[in-house]
Image (cartoon, coloured by chain):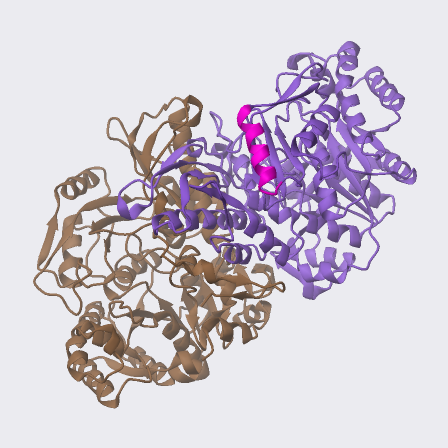
Chain colours: A purple, B brown
Amino acid sequence: MLSDIDIAQAARCKPIGEIARDLGIPEEYLVPYGRNKAKVDLRFLRSLEDRPQGKLILVTATTPTAAGEGKTTVTIGLAQALVRKGKSAMLCLREPSLGPCFGVKGGAAGGGYSQVLPMEEINLHFTGDIHAVGVAHNLLSAMIDNHLQQGNPLGIDPRRVTWRRVMDMNDRALRHLVIGLGGKGDGVPRETGFDISVASEVMAILCLADGIEDLKARLGRIVVAYTYEGKPVTASDLKAQGAMAALLKEAIQPNLVQTIEHVPAFVHGGPFANIAHGTNSIAATRTALRLRDYVVVEAGFASDLGAEKFMDIVSPYGGFHPEAVVVVTTVRALKLHGGLPKDRLGEEDLEAVRAGLANLEAHIGNMQQFGVPVVVALNRFTADTDRELELVRGAVQAQGASIALAEVWAKGGEGGLELADRVLEALDKGNRYGPLYAWNLPLAEKIRTVATKVYGADGVVLEEGAAKTLKELESLGYGNLPVCMAKTQMSLSDRPELKGRPKGFEVHVREVRLSAGAGFVVAICGPIMTMPGLPKSPAAERIDIDADGRITGLF
Amino acid sequence: MLSDIDIAQAARCKPIGEIARDLGIPEEYLVPYGRNKAKVDLRFLRSLEDRPQGKLILVTATTPTAAGEGKTTVTIGLAQALVRKGKSAMLCLREPSLGPCFGVKGGAAGGGYSQVLPMEEINLHFTGDIHAVGVAHNLLSAMIDNHLQQGNPLGIDPRRVTWRRVMDMNDRALRHLVIGLGGKGDGVPRETGFDISVASEVMAILCLADGIEDLKARLGRIVVAYTYEGKPVTASDLKAQGAMAALLKEAIQPNLVQTIEHVPAFVHGGPFANIAHGTNSIAATRTALRLRDYVVVEAGFASDLGAEKFMDIVSPYGGFHPEAVVVVTTVRALKLHGGLPKDRLGEEDLEAVRAGLANLEAHIGNMQQFGVPVVVALNRFTADTDRELELVRGAVQAQGASIALAEVWAKGGEGGLELADRVLEALDKGNRYGPLYAWNLPLAEKIRTVATKVYGADGVVLEEGAAKTLKELESLGYGNLPVCMAKTQMSLSDRPELKGRPKGFEVHVREVRLSAGAGFVVAICGPIMTMPGLPKSPAAERIDIDADGRITGLF
């Protein structure tokens, strides 16, 4: 069988100028990066403001398993199928982080005949956005430590600097470190650490900002530390926001690429879906909605993480109105949720599927709560039996959702035609989208709403420090921000080992962090990895390039 | 008076495709980055191998002073002047590091009417080369610490890991740190530090590599650590070179831009001129030499650093034959070398000029030793008096060199016509270029040659560790590499406070480092800063961007 990179390298891209021309983007607003990638000048977005908006289709999935659900692949395949049906459609994805490419997972640009191209470039440096985020982040870090070194006129408590540094690399040895060693001229010693670049609040800001002025304002509001008196210190106190915004001048422009079937795609911004909101930039989605009648947008992780945040944080900030949700799943994933061991996924097992359906039902119900019709995309594997498929179909329909088989990995858009039909029908039904909570509720109440209504928890336990921080944040005027729940993606609960649809648990909020620039309060429930490590045999050892520049080992 | 950024923003670039077409670069080999920057595919360089080479003119300067000599500006102005005289000419520069832009110095792309454009983009992320160098470097770092974490089968001694990490930022707090804290899952605790990205050996390798295969081979030879038994551990022992080279796939392609007068310029690679060789990539220079009759190349710092290394390291590796050297100086700089305080530079002072001429004479002599004719470019300031200029002219001519006034900041190429005439005359004289030492001499002997013949030292003192390392390196088979002397740029000696032309001193080699990938042995003489800090009031505080994306505060 051909690998993803083989298929990608055999595919021919249209010149990106041609893709842009078909979208009606004038040449003066197109900034080429090589022949197959381009940025779109934000001034073009401004020129579109009076146009009607297309329909927004959000793609989420069941709780991730080791089997892989194929959410990105379905997102791409669905847009390809809509175009095959003669619709005006495109898609929006997050851009992959470079670090994990060298760890376990290889690339992240879809798969098979539902990929975005050029695959290697998207996976490696792409148009430099994540590098720009990293430098803007680390400039602020350097200015903080420089402030400490140069007499500390703001009175920053070096023990309360919350702003860390970032690197786009899986590098566990940088999680906890002591900097500023070496002597008087080499900074003030203190404990800190590095996160992976995409975990930076700057990435979240880039994806939520509404133009350069808003970007600068949000950057300026970042809280980086507290003074000895407990007063928050912001990036604007350090006069950092102008230079940071200058570094993000190109990064804020959406990146245009194409799928293997030449369907236009914005791949732009890549915030985490736990400590941040987990979808591509508002700028990209907003532009897409003015260029096409149908826009397919992927959210990170499952409905309890990326999709909930899209409904409760991103859509209110972006002025979006999602009109249908696709929940991607596989029979294999349902079997794992139903308790079947990984080595028996190839066998028909109706009992395991039935048990695993609880997970799918929870995600369908989660999305229906937001008043939006749900279509399940069952990503088909050859081992799936008709009886297994029928079982899933019956359960989904009983819940008032529709379902289609997807074979987009093997067949591209052709394999997504049934899914496209179901989605178009769902859109015809109309919807009454609304977020789950009002932003003016108390922070703890907003956390409780998500935990009980989306995770299925009985309640929330605020650990001591967390309760105290929530009160502090409300007294500092941050009480009206939405809440961004950071919990494991491996379970609907906050305990990764609980598969299926956990019941009778409480969500434990261990810590609360402020992302004042991004505009949300992060409630941390359980250990969240913001700096991954490399495995025993990193993928990097197998990545290579030949004399003609052909890359191998990215998959 | 208009600032550099005002002049740059008022200038109009030609489309980069037009510049490339004039150079005869076929469209298929041009990779655009926006409208005004492009990379040139290395396969184009291969297609040029049979063409005759143009003449290489190297630009260096007197010992740097606080007054600034304007070396980059003269390099650009000279190429512009040659084109004005109807010659087929272009230039090659290093690309500026982003970190220092936020510190003291602002941009680094020439000045006035002798700039390369687009100035802001060249100074900020440009085409991402330095980001790529940083990631490739840090991938190797992460693989080293991952190896330690995953059982350390190679037996790396954690106390003898010589490979640090890098960041493109002035961040003194990262010079010395302890990583791997936090517990068993968070790496092995050890002491290390960060350098600024351009100080990475990967940058030196990128600039010396002859295509992707050679790049990979050099990366594989990097020595990153020693085992408990004292055996060197290389990047290829960690299987890192393939992934590192894949990350550098675009970075190795020369960047094409233009000057304010639309003269083509390669701005590519930016190694330090102390711990590395200090000139733009061999790929850029080699391509330029096949596209134009005259190629002006700038070397870092003064003749004792960048230019010496160009003659002794870069030219042998690149197969270059420099045919003339331009030494840039100013009356103000000579006065500072002559002992005049900074606040009196505006006054005529023949005595100070006469005293300072010793510095210029040393640099002229240094370059003449390599068998190449020397032209002094006296970068003119309004306060310079005729008598001062005459004094310099007489001294230069007495040494057998020629001299021209340059007013390229204010007048562009028009201000460099006299300089262009002198350079053309010098080229007509012919030359007998040769390096100063044979590579097969003992390492200590090569160090002694540079110290005595170029720095004017009486001899070399090898401190204990340095002598031991030299022996070790020779026994490990690295004795035939050229030596790269890392010393202060602020003096011809190894003591920054010694201005003018120091006499009666010895050069102290404190430490010897191996850059086996780049292909040289670094002799460290005195403190060398590989991670700068920010000043009390960083330039970053004054950099800003408006709603239309116009950047201010870069100068």
Name the side, left or right, on which A481 lies relative to B447. right
Question: Relative to A476, is A215 above or below?
Answer: below
Q: Magenta span has A521?
A: no
Residue at image point 67% right, 47% down: A281
Does residue A222 lie above or below B183 as drawn? Answer: below
Q: Quadrant of residue A98?
A: top right
Q: In the image, what residue occupies the spot 19% across and 50% down?
A: B440
Q: Quadrant of the N terminus of chain B?
A: bottom left
The quadrant of the picture occupied by the C terminus of chain B is: bottom left
Please provide percent x and percent y for residue B64: 27, 67
Rendering coords of residue B554 (x, y %): 47, 65
> Can you give x and y, in whole percent of width and height, for residue B516 in the image?
30, 44
**Which percent across, then down, holds residue A234?**
51, 48
Name the chief secondary structure element in magenta: helix
> Can residue B120 be seen in this snapshot?
yes
| Region in magenta | A464-478
Picture quadrant of residue A326: top right
Task: Name the residue nearer the viewer: B521 or B394.
Answer: B394
Q: How many marks?
A: 0
In the image, taking residue B357 as reference, residue B156 lies left or right, namely right
Q: Is residue B135 left or right of residue B486?
A: right
* Residue A379 visible somewhere in the drawing: no
Which of these two is toward me, A163 or B39? A163
Q: Residue at x 39, y 32 (%)?
A: B144
User: Image height check: is B101 above or below B84?
Assistant: above
